[in-house]
Image (tube, grey):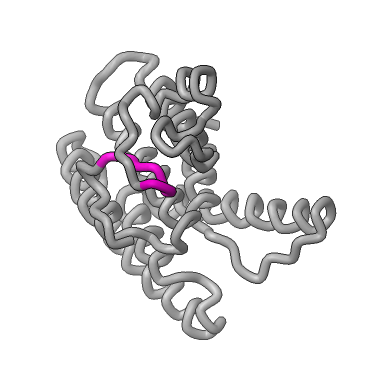
Amino acid sequence: MKQPIFFTHSQCIHCKKKLAFIDLIPIISCLIQGFHCRYCLKQLPSIYLVEELLGGFFSLLVLKNGIDFSSFYIYIFLLQAFLLSLTDFLYWKVEPKILYPLFLFLLSLHLFLNQTLFWKTGIGIFLLFTCFTYFTNNSMGYGDVILLSCWSILLGHIAILHIIFLASINGLLFCIINKLLFKKNYRKIPFVPFLSIGLFFYLYI
């Protein structure tokens, strides 16, 4: 990912023209343009539509009960998870430009809300999964390890174990369903999207 993450415009992957704001509104873009670029008329990736819809859904879900620091904290948490899911899915990378700034921001909000920090849990998770990754021939990415360590500091061991369990179950189901229905065998899958699903279920279910 050579382009900066923040403060950049979405662009057509074909002609590289910057997309207008109206192009990024899923309903309008689909109805008026058939989700095609207005400049070169080629179809835009479906992931654009998915990310806009999910981003709007998370915003409505978190802010439906009003805006306060607690809801804003959860919103930033889910935003980080969502953005990192996209970078992991598209580029097989846990983007540091998203991970570290948003973690520091979450850490500041966490302290402002007078919540407990679980430094020992974070260190323990980091050491445990670093060893696991080393002895299993990098079966888990180091970006995943760092993300889990950061989340562990904020959430504690019980929450992070729930998230890992849910992520593992969802990842396993994904592989099984793809093998049974589509005859696809995945030797490697992006794990952050499943961690994000685990985080979402932990926060709301």
Residue 203 can be seen in this image: no
Q: Quadrant of the N terminus?
A: bottom left
Residue 19: image location, x then y, percent: 34, 34
Residue drawn at x 46%, y 51% is: 158
Q: Quadrant of the C terminus?
A: top right
In this orientation, which residue lies closer to the viewer: 55 or 109?
55
Per the image, is 120 magenta? no
In this orientation, which residue lies closer to the viewer: 26 or 131?
26
Residue 177: image location, x then y, percent: 77, 51
- On screen, residue 165 versus residue 60, left or right, reads right
Instruction: Tell me where residue 38 sits by quadrant.
Output: top left
Image vertical order of residue 16 relative to residue 150, above or below: above
In this orientation, which residue lies closer to the viewer: 28 or 88?
28
Residue drawn at x 38%, y 60% is: 94
Residue 11: image location, x then y, percent: 35, 42
The secondary structure that most of the magenta stretch takes on is loop
In this orientation, which residue lies closer to the viewer: 33 or 180?
33
Per the image, is 13 magenta? yes
Q: Work out which residue is located at the far front of the displayed protein and give it.
A: 40
Residue 159 can be seen in this image: yes
Q: How many marks?
A: 0
Residue drawn at x 53%, y 60% is: 190
Residue 81: image location, x then y, percent: 40, 46
Q: Which residues are magenta?
A: 9-15
